[in-house]
Amino acid sequence: MWDEAKQIRFNKLRATERQGPLTEVEHAELVLLTQELDALEAASLTPATARVQQERTRLEAENGQLEALLHEQQAYLAIVRRLVTELQDREQQWRARYAAITGRAWTAEQTEAS
């Protein structure tokens, strides 16, 4: 368990280390305190890391579903565009046939009256 006494000792050893080399005993003590602190920090981060990983997994699955939806919508849009082109071509053919039959161009008023 990390307590205030260990924190004070850790800080003192770090300050001493910044001023010059530690004794072998001080160095060993600092290594042990550092390892203990690292282990405590790792343990405290484990739940958060697990939550982040779960969220990432969820987002990746959602992203895959959204990509599938996008591809489906793009395929549908291609179908709609082909249909619109076919309808426009058919309209042009009817206009041409009308002009060939009557000798007159089809007008917007005729389209609205139909």
Image: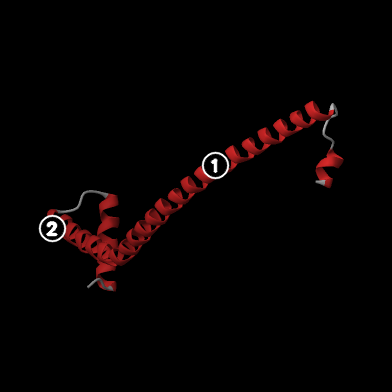
Residue 40 placed where, x, y %? 25, 66
Q: Is residue 106 left or right of residue 53?
A: right
- From the image, state whether disc 2 or disc 1 is nearer to you: 1
Residue 3 placed where, x, y %? 26, 73
Q: Mark 2 points at which residue?
A: 25
Q: Which quarter of the rendering shows the N terminus?
A: bottom left
Q: Is residue 33 left or right of residue 69?
A: left
Camera-side residue: 79 or 73?
79
Q: In this view, does 77 lie to the left or right of 68?
A: right
Residue 38 placed where, x, y %? 24, 60
Q: Residue at x 30, y 67 (%)?
A: 47
Query: Looking at the image, do the residues carrying marks 2 and 1 touch, with CB atoms under 8 Å apart?
Result: no
Mark 2 closeness class: few <14, some 14–19, many ≥20 residues within 10 Å: few
Q: Is mark 1 on a helix, strand or loop?
A: helix
Mark 1 closeness class: few <14, some 14–19, many ≥20 residues within 10 Å: few
Q: Residue at x 73, y 34 (%)?
A: 94
Say which quarter of the image contains residue 15: bottom left
The amino acid at mark 1 is Ile
Q: Is residue 2 left or right of residue 110?
A: left
Q: Name the residue under label 1.
A: 79
The amino acid at mark 2 is Val
